[in-house]
Amino acid sequence: MTTDFIRDMDTTLLQLNSKDVFSLRTAYEGIFVLGGIGSGKTSGAGRAIAGAMLRSGAGGLVMVAKPEEIELWQSYAKQHGRTDDLVLFNEKAGCNFIAYEFSRKGVQGANSVTDCIMRILDAAEKAAGQGAGKDSDPFWKNTSRQMLLYSISALYGATGNVTVEDIVRFVTTAPTKRPTTPEELQEVEKSFAFRTLKQFDTEPVCEVPADVKKAVNSYWALQYTALAEKTRSSILIHVTSSLNRFATGMLRKCFCDETTIVPEMSFAGKIILLGLPILTMNEEAIVGQQLFQFLWMRAVESRNGLGKQFSERPLFLYGDECQYFVTPYWDTFLSTCRGSRCAVIAMSQSLPTLYAQIGQDKSDFVDGLTGKFLTKLFFLNSCPRSNKWASELIGKGLKIRKTQTQGVTTGMNTNRGGSQASTNEGWHKSEGTNTGTSEQEYEASLLDTNYFSTSLKTGGPKNNFEVSGVWFRAGAQFFEPIPNTSSNVVLATFIQQ
């Protein structure tokens, strides 16, 4: 039986205080959460928002950094009646990404598969620390993409089937120069690449457009052989070294074998839990999760072309420790996901954590990305940079400084006078008090940076298991904002138990 779901975007999902609420409409605008270790961001806001999305009947994708998150989400699903909807994508599951893309787009799938592999190359490079967060030279990206696109197109046209092993085999056996003798021609004709190209040209299993066929033949016959030997070798090493990750182990089993899970399952209310923890499976888990995430995002973006039964249900993408999962495509997805009824919930410890993982040269990207989340939550944090950002985001305003003065004066006069006959004595005492009050307007931060490091609850027995955080939403007019701040800032309290 399919789980029902909320259709009204203004339905209340969470009560922030006695008057202010969190709705699906707010969720679709994106939620970004910052909080230091032990601040309660996961057990407080993370738990509450996850529960809200589950109760709404939403389908979703959950990224996993820590192994304990698998059991945590299983408990969430049980608590909110969604156990049957939770789908665990672990080493026993699979999504053959190449077959998946071709099944969606047919002959045109070659470009989609190439895009996926380019993201694999980028993720693998950064996961191994080789990229140091920096973009590769565009020349290497463009030439690598050319090699991949024209090998994938040739394989699909010739055989109707593409595997990672065949891509590697094709590019490593492709002729590097035009044969000039019968012996050289005979040797070339034995190669896997030559036989594939011949079948592609004369007896294709899948007919491809004429312009694609012409481009493929031109590349392998002329452009590829014209490359300098050193350049060609560098491109080949760049492509094959990353694709060889899929030759064995988890990546082969999960992404190159049988398909048991596809992104579209979320449209029917399934919550796909990527049970490939990064902290235990390391680089392979980063590559695998980023790959499936990319497939899921593109499926979500295109679902508005499907029937209402697949396009109406709310969706969510949830990533705690999101620094491991953020890719350049997040920027595009956040710009469009509201129209696809998808909420993105991203959580991290601090801004420097994001900069360090994504790359210092990507500061504009990080700033632009975080700016696309209209709702931001700030929990206790000892990071001065993050706290300064939170304070500046909330803004400045006019405050009143009151000054009160008080003065007291006391005086005594004594007069003595006399004659031989008498003596006269007299005295006089006086007291006075002056008070004054003045007020002065001045501009100051509505919430100082130290507020985020001293004034928020972190849960646990000492706080009655209450976690508090500053809930900021661009453009909001909350009924009960934090006193002496702006109307779009409230203090939200979450219960851990």
Image: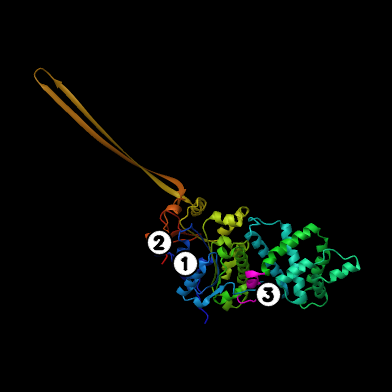
Query: In the picture shown, does residue 433 fall above or below 260?
Result: above
Q: Which residue is situated farthest in the left direction here?
A: 421
Q: Residues within 10 Å of mark 1 (few under 14, many from 20)?
A: some
Q: Position of residue 416 (x, y in %)?
A: 16, 23
Name the residue located 52 percent from the left edge and 51 percent from the top edge: 385
If you read the primary sequence from the N terminus, does the residue marked by circle 2 or circle 3 appear first? 3
What whole-number distance in Å separates the C-alpha atoms at marks 2 and 3? 48 Å
What whole-number distance in Å separates the C-alpha atoms at marks 2 and 1? 15 Å
SS at circle 2:
loop
Q: Position of residue 1 (x, y in %)?
A: 52, 82
If you read the primary sequence from the N terminus, does the residue marked by circle 2 or circle 1 appear first? 1
Name the residue located 64 percent from the left edge and 69 percent from the top edge: 249
Q: Which residue is situated farthest in the right direction here?
A: 181
Please identify, in this view, whether the residue under mark 2 or under mark 1 is nearer the observer: 2
Q: Is residue 301 magenta?
A: no
Write the start and end of the magenta stretch as one range.
248-261
Rendering quarter of residue 130: bottom right
What label does residue 47 carry, if any? Answer: 1
Q: Identify the residue under disc 2.
A: 460
Q: Amino acid at mark 3?
A: Ala
If you read the primary sequence from the N terminus, does the residue marked by circle 3 or circle 1 appear first? 1
Q: Position of residue 57 (x, y in %)?
A: 50, 75
Name the residue located 81 percent from the left edge and 73 percent from the top edge: 195
What label does residue 99 carry, if any? Answer: 3
Q: Assign the C terminus to one quadrant of the image.
A: bottom left
SS at circle 3:
helix
